[in-house]
Amino acid sequence: MSGSSADNASSWSRLSSLGRKDIEAGRKPLRMLVTGREGQVVSALVELGWHQEEFEILALGRPDLDLADTRSIDGAITARRPDIIVSAAAYTAVDQAETDKASAHAVNSIAPGEIGRVASRLGIPVIHLSTDYVFDGTKTSPYEETDPTNPLGVYGRSKLEGEYALAAATDDHVILRTAWVYSPFGRNFLKTMLTVAATRDHLSVVDDQQGNPTSALDIADAIVTVARNLLQERASTLRGTFHLAGRGAASWADFAAGIFETSRPMGGPSAELARITSADYPTAARRPANSRLHTAKLASVHGVTMPDWQSSMRTVVSRCLPLRDNNHQNPSKI
Ligand SMILES: NC(=O)C1=CN([C@@H]2O[C@H](COP(=O)(O)OP(=O)(O)OC[C@H]3O[C@@H](n4cnc5c(N)ncnc54)[C@H](O)[C@@H]3O)[C@@H](O)[C@H]2O)C=CC1
């Protein structure tokens, strides 16, 4: 294990697809610094780290790394000098961002630029997570990377500014725009549906927004593939912006229906669904009606093909049942 005493609370965890030959050849694991400590994507990467040895993962969040404090970003990265950085942490409270613009701006717009500047100085590639909410949803087919952006709210705008800031700071980056993230970790739509259905028989869920439910477990797999590619080849074609999302589209109501159809036969919670419109369920931030993402570029350039959202959803539902606090548990400690 590597890392300083500051890493105690968030130790380097091992990610391996190193073959026996690599290990016999004494090849050292590559060091991946992930921003954030307990987010969905962070937790999925840490968990992946327990099962593999190609990368050592350091999930670094507050107080060691505070994205709202640019000096802390420089200090945290410079002290650890990883082989690659995954910028996964963000201000993700979409509605709260409408009234807390300063925090969203600091974490989502400013921090990625600082990460990029430090990474560029040290010669480290950066994989940065962004969002489908950079689009306004008026397109009638899935969004491609080259489509014009036009965020509807503060969160989407702050994430788009973060994309610009990172790209201006370093060419050695990949921006992965993902969508509708769920997992056994943290807070997300899938876990909310199961929790609410445990106490209510009827639920109203929005049916006029279309997107791609995406498992953080699949995102973690994809990040490892992209990281490997970036570290193996300097080609500019591997860099830039890519869309990463579960295969197949759904509305939130379709997603909820799938969750309950999976949960019910497992003896888990389920509820009757009423399909409603966004107008029936006003939120502080407007959401795009269509935020489906076209993912062919990531498949052809990086070889990443995502599973159907239904099959990934079934995996996550089964991990969430019976309902309990599903924050990651190191299997080696069970
Ligand atoms: N959750 C979703 O549905 C979507 C997420 N994304 C993007 O994917 C990425 C990962 O999302 P999730 O894992 O779902 O996020 P999450 O909300 O589960 O976790 C965010 C993490 O960021 C950390 N964080 C927040 N402020 C921080 C600060 N000042 N300093 C250090 N750490 C801080 C939090 O502590 C948490 O660990 C984010 O960049 C997000 O914008 C994109 C599309 C949809």
Image: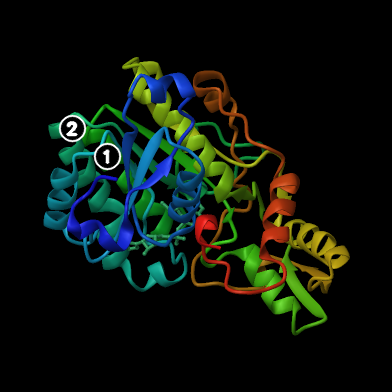
Q: State the residue position of label 2.
A: 120
Q: Are marks 1 and 2 in contact (CB under 8 Å)?
A: no
Q: Is residue 67 left or right of residue 199?
A: left
Q: Residue at x 56, y 63 (%)?
A: 334
> Three-letter amino acid code at disc 2?
Ser
Q: Residue at x 18, y 32 (%)?
A: 120
Q: Residues within 10 Å of mark 1 (few under 14, many from 20)?
A: many
Q: Nearer the viewer, residue 301 or 55?
A: 55
Q: Residues within 10 Å of mark 2 (few under 14, many from 20)?
A: some
- Indicate the secondary structure of the residue bearing disc 1: helix
Q: Nearer the viewer, residue 273 or 3?
A: 3
- Indicate the secondary structure of the residue bearing disc 2: helix
Q: Picture coordinates of residue 255 (x, y %)?
A: 73, 57
Look at the image and tell me whether residue 146 can be seen.
Answer: no
Q: Picture coordinates of residue 282 (x, y %)?
A: 60, 73
Q: Nearer the viewer, residue 132 or 147?
A: 132
Of circles 1 and 2, the one toward us is: 2
Quarter of the image where the N terminus is located: top left
Tally of numbered tags? 2
Q: Residue at x 22, y 44 (%)?
A: 115
The Cα atoms of the two marked residues, 1 and 2, are separated by 10 Å
Q: State the residue position of label 1.
A: 166
Choose top left, top right, bottom left or bottom right for residue 188: bottom right
> Three-letter amino acid code at disc 1?
Leu
Q: Picture coordinates of residue 198 (x, y %)?
A: 75, 80
Q: Which mark is residue 92?
A: none
Coloring scheme of the render?
rainbow
Ligand 1, seen in the image, is in the quarter at bottom left
Which residue extends farthest right? 265
Q: Is residue 83 left or right of residue 189?
A: left
Q: Is mark 1 within 8 Å of ligand 1?
A: no
